Image (cartoon, rainbow, N blue to C red):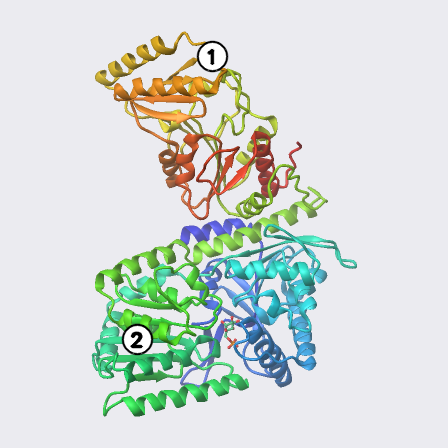
Amino acid sequence: MTEAIAEMTHMTGGRELVMVSNRLPVDRVTLEDGSMHWRASPGGLVTAVEPIVEQLGCVWIGWAGDAGEEIEPFEVGRMRLAPITLSIDEVAEYYEGFSNGTLWPLYHDVIAKPEYHREWWDRYQSVNRRFADRVAQEASHGAIVWVHDYQLQLVPAMLREARPDLTIAFFLHIPFPPRRIFAQLPWRRQLVEGLLGSDVIGFQRVADAISFRAVAERYGTAPSIGNTIVTPARGEQPGHTALAQEFPISIDAAAFAKIAEQPEIRARALQIRQDLGNPKTIMLGVDRLDYTKGIRHRLKAFDELIADGELEPAEAVLVQVASPSRERVEAYRQLRDDVEVTVGRINGERGSIGHSPVNYLHRSFTKDEMVALYLAADVLLVTPLRDGMNLVAKEYVACRGDERGALVLSEFAGAADELRDALLVNPHDIEGLKAAILRAAHMPEREQARRMRGMRRAVYNNDVAHWAQNYLGAVCAAADAKTQTQTGGRTEPIQVSAAYVPRQVDDRIRRLAAAPQLTVAIDFDGTVAPLVKRPADARILPRAQQALDVLREAPGVQVVLLTGRSLAGLAETQVASDGWIISGSHGAELMGLPGTTGVETLAPPTDEEREALQRAQRRVHRALGQVPGVRFEEKPFGFAVHTREVKDEIEAEELLTAAVEIGEAAGLHTRAGKRVREMSVRESNKGDVLNRIRAALPLAPVLFLGDDVTDEDAFAVLGHDDLGIKVGDGETAATQRVADPASVAAVLAMLAELRTGTVIGS
Ligand code: G6P
């Protein structure tokens, strides 16, 4: 974590960080002597960004949470807080009205009916203006401004106009609605234009980013190329590009795990179980009391399970924590009444003296108490009808180092994209919900452990440091590009020359270009160097060489060459490969890996192996040596037979089959390539060696381009964040394809240009 944060400090390059959110991330506490203090508030939007802010320090602009109050700036830890004042009318119309009576329901699948009032809209604009003015006043030159959430969607454009020197990032913590629903909003164009003032717009889910790009095109006349939205010039404002992409938010998993290990927290968990009467199953729900959270559906399912006799009221308890929220908004008042009546009814009908099936707690708890609750709970019910992410689900998983406990998770929560090992439910389907709750209550320990392991892997793989690195990485790349433009390095916006790059490849390359760390791996023959008759005549295309030269120098990028050639055979091509990691002979030779010197090779052949090799080589030479067009190549652990120059393709195939038969009879490993077969005493392949290389560069997603059958081993080990591009025809495990080496050069040139701004000609 600390390492990752140190990396971020480096990335921001000394620029000031300014956070902007509706609410300041602090609570006021009055001590016994009547004195007043501020402390970081435990929940909400702040949870995720807290560790980043603690390390980087920031200015934070927001509302302190009470109407009409004017408060001087103050400091808490490394944050300097600059409070915004909101009048009673502004709270009613901007916050309760437009934010929570219009946008919130509109963005959450219209679960409640959004209201459209022109006075609310006017207030939303004027309050957004106040926030933007305050930022413009507080932010130092060239600062990174990070605007949070739906209450402040007009701030980016207002700020861009006032302060073109700033880099503006926006993150939407809640879902972005599908275009059909967004279309209802009378002020849809203005909102889209507001957001398009940003350099980077982050969303929780892929679907949110896709919806936004569609809306930007329709209502903002701003088309996208991949994840990049091209915003046209408006009036005085020059055009620019904005990255609109998903960055699923997360938690500081290790910090939660640490709390969960403390003996006093474990003791507290036992105490909670005891206080609840040591029931067989404790189920837990933790939500803000909000109609999007599906609390009514959950209570209904729980009640019916008792009524059906599926759950014994004495054996199962549901603890429902519902923290108070937006109590002056009508839909929330209604919800509170409904929930409290239902809880009363269930306890009245199903309870007994000294035992209530539902334990309802209408307040918030400290982080420690939450962790104790997570440890006490056998089942966590996270069943919202719609939720941006839901960090409670991730917190539960992070705390369960004991690999116990079951998670019932709504497929409509963002977390469902990552926590695939949860019991996923559609909360509208009450029968399905009941079945999942029952399954969770009776889940065998082995299944709990298996699922929990999978979920823990997902949470640890994308913890808050990973999230922040990706998001801030993209923001800092935008900031760097801006600095270059402003210092005269480049005055034109980036014009990417993507002559041969198919649209889908283009999308993925743009995303990779923004990754803080990146491994660019290539095959040689047939990929960056066109195939030629004599292997020694092969030459890398000048454009590919130039692009790789630029990428090699770019911070955070490692160039890797995975070739079937021996290192000696590669040297003949005169490729300039300083600073690359090079794997030769399909992984049998390796050089340039960080922390190593010289060439690492597999164990040399034993005498016996050498003999077998020589025997096979002799036979193959004898059998095929006279055939016109057949060539032999020496390899460190074997040899290769080439038939590229044999005119008849069928004959070439037959010759290669014969060679393989001889090799196999001598116990050699054989490997097929395009018009070539290799025999070797050592088994190695590009997939294994790529795995070794990435173990040395664990944070970097991998781009790998290759054309041959032997490159399939490398494609096969690529993961979700990586990108495999097959060059030319033929079956492949790669997800993308380009036509030929010239297109490979175009892909590399585009990547180099996006990453560094250096234009590489065709
Ligand atoms: C959600 C929103 C936040 C908001 C929080 C609490 O998490 O995404 O922007 O601050 O709810 O809501 P409140 O209305 O009390 O600020």
Residue that numbered label 1 is attached to: 629
Is 155 in front, or is 632?
Answer: 632
Percent position of residue 74, x then y: 54, 72
Q: Is residue 247 left or right of residue 270?
A: right
Residue 558, position as x, y percentages in the image: 48, 37
Mark closest to the chain's N terminus, 2 or 1: 2
Q: Are marks 2 and 1 in contact (CB under 8 Å)?
A: no
Q: In the image, residue 159 lies at what x, y percent?
A: 67, 63
Q: CA distance from mark 2 to mark 1?
A: 74 Å
Per the image, label 1 sits on a secondary structure element best described as loop
Residue 357: image x %, image y %?
28, 84
The quadrant in which residue 429 appears is bottom left
- Quarter where residue 529 is shown: top right
Camera-nearest residue between 700 and 488: 700
Determine which quarter of the picture holds residue 601: top left
Callout 2 crowding tier (Cα within 10 Å): few <14, some 14–19, many ≥20 = many
